[in-house]
Amino acid sequence: MSHNTVMKHLQKLRKIVTLAYHLEWLDKDPFIRWKPTFETKQREFLNANELSNLETYAFPLERLDRVHDLFIFSCYTRISYADLIKLTPNHIVLGIDGSRWIYTKRQKTKTPVKIPLLDKAESIIQKYVDDPITIVSKTLLPVLTNERINSSLF
């Protein structure tokens, strides 16, 4: 495990030990002076070739193709999964430049964002306009649970 993973596990253990201490199951809190330290990691972006390879890959299953489309859409809009599944047609607005934009708020920070809708992202939206899942959920893209997406990735 990496250092940061170990720290996350220790944080969870610390919560349980602290609870045990407060319930007087332990005489002393062994974590009393311990603080987790995390290493700053620089996330790498996909390069143009990697993104192109992902875009052109043909998935054999429809379920995998949907996960693929959600990921590619995220690449072109920088919208997180939590925000992506909440997008509705109401979030698409015609900008002052005459092109379509996504106006929404980030779930985590509540920060308003305005994102230009690039052609690749627009084509993914158009692909799912008549999809039964998007019609029922009234979302721009098919809503899949995070667990279902993760199981598709492994």
Image (cartoon, rainbow, N blue to C red):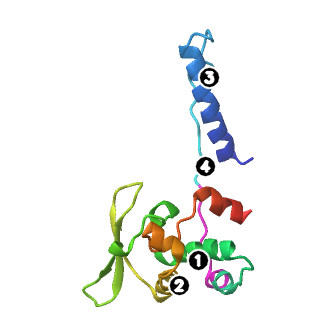
- Are the residues tagged 1 and 3 within 8 Å (C-beta)? no
Say which of marks 1 and 3 sits in front: 1
Q: CA distance from mark 1 to mark 4?
A: 32 Å
- Report the amino acid beneath label 2: Lys
- Report the amino acid beneath label 1: Asp
Q: Nearer the viewer, residue 105 or 43?
A: 105
Say which of marks 1 and 2 sits in front: 2
Q: Residues within 10 Å of mark 3 (few under 14, many from 20)?
A: some
Q: What numbered label is drawn on residue 39? A: 4
Q: Residues within 10 Å of mark 1 (few under 14, many from 20)?
A: many
Q: Nearer the viewer, residue 119 or 151?
A: 151
Q: Which residue is mark 2?
A: 127
* Pointer 1 or 4: first along the chain: 4
Q: CA distance from mark 4 to mark 3?
A: 24 Å
Say which of marks 4 and 2 sits in front: 2
Name which quarter of the figure residue 49 lies in: bottom right
- Report the amino acid beneath label 3: Val
Q: Main secondary structure of the magenta part?
A: loop
Q: CA distance from mark 1 to mark 2?
A: 9 Å
Q: Does residue 67 lie above or below 108 as drawn? A: below
- Are the residues tagged 1 and 2 within 8 Å (C-beta)? yes
* Pointer 1 or 2: first along the chain: 1
At 28% from the left edge and 84% from the top edge, which residue is drawn? 95
Q: Which residue is mark 3?
A: 17
- Report the amino acid beneath label 4: Glu
Task: Name the spot of residue 37 as percent of width and height, x first.
Answer: 59, 40
Q: CA distance from mark 2 to mark 3?
A: 50 Å
Q: What numbered label is drawn on residue 69? A: 1
- Are the residues tagged 2 and 3 within 8 Å (C-beta)? no
- What span is in magenta? 41-51
Q: CA distance from mark 4 to mark 2?
A: 41 Å
Left or right? Give the position of 27 relative to 128.
right
